[in-house]
Image (cartoon, grey):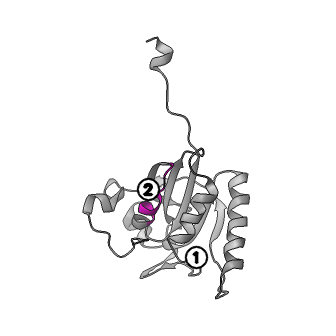
Amino acid sequence: MDSMEAQKTEPVRPKATFGAGCFWGVEVAFRRVPGVVETSVGYTGGTSEHPTYPEVCTGTTGHAEAVEVLYDPERVSYADLLEVFWSCHNPTTRNRQGPDVGTQYRSVIFFHTPAQEAIARASKERHQQARKDRRPVVTEVVPASTFYRAEEYHQRYFEKTLSPGRCFPGD
């Protein structure tokens, strides 16, 4: 094996970032998708650097609990990931998902490219038009900012605890 073969690296994967309430259950929903290579839960969209979970929980940092998804676009599209996002939370409740209340639980799509922005906005419009109850979809579509990975005990939380808890979508 020559040095070039030894230095082969994984391909750079596109990234998608979503806030849809409690990040534990949202992470599970994305981990189940074929073509999702990796997920991380964390905080993004706020003003403070390196926030901690207790700080984010106060609702004063401006961060949303979010899931960052690395995916293989040959196996799953960004539009497909958006469908998972829409299915795992209620996009008509501002700053609330179930019993969790606060700006950190807002419905938000953090786009990384102009193409993601266009796809996200079109998807949001389709979901608004398809709603039978006509309640407005309050999901924000905003540029991605620094993603701060949450504390390790939050990563793959349900796999570690074997307890799906109250914010587990899809079951």
Q: Which residue is under mark 2?
A: 31
Residue positioned 54% across, 34% down in the render: 11
The kind of secondary structure element at disc 2 is: helix
Q: Say left or right for 155 vs 21.
A: left
Residue positioned 48% across, 56% down in the render: 33
Q: Nearer the viewer, residue 141 or 121?
A: 121
Q: Main secondary structure of the magenta part?
A: helix
Could you say where residue 68 lies in the image, as x and y percent from the top left? 50, 54
Q: Quadrant of the C terminus?
A: bottom left
Q: Quadrant of the N terminus?
A: top left
Q: Let me know if residue 54 is in the magenta part.
A: no
| Amino acid at circle 2 | Arg
Asked if residue 50 can be seen in this view, the reply is no
Residue projecting furthest to the bottom: 133
Could you say where residue 126 lies in the image, as x and y percent from the top left? 71, 72
Asked if residue 129 can be seen in this view, the reply is yes
Could you say where residue 89 lies in the image, as x and y percent from the top left? 51, 74
Based on the displayed image, in which of its 4 quarters is residue 83 positioned?
Answer: bottom right
Residue positioned 67% across, 62% down in the render: 120
The residues bearing labels 1 and 2 have C-alpha atoms spaced at a distance of 20 Å
Other residues around mark 2 within 10 Å, as few (<14) / some (14–19) / many (≥20): some
Other residues around mark 1 within 10 Å, as few (<14) / some (14–19) / many (≥20): many
**Nearer to us: label 1 or label 2:** 2
Magenta residue span: 26-35
Q: Is residue 21 above or below residue 92?
A: above
Q: Is residue 48 above or below residue 135?
A: above
| Amino acid at circle 1 | Pro
Could you say where residue 43 lies in the image, as x and y percent from the top left? 48, 60
Q: Which residue is under mark 1?
A: 91
Q: Earlier in the sequence, mark 1 or mark 2?
A: 2
Q: Let me know if residue 33 is in the magenta part.
A: yes
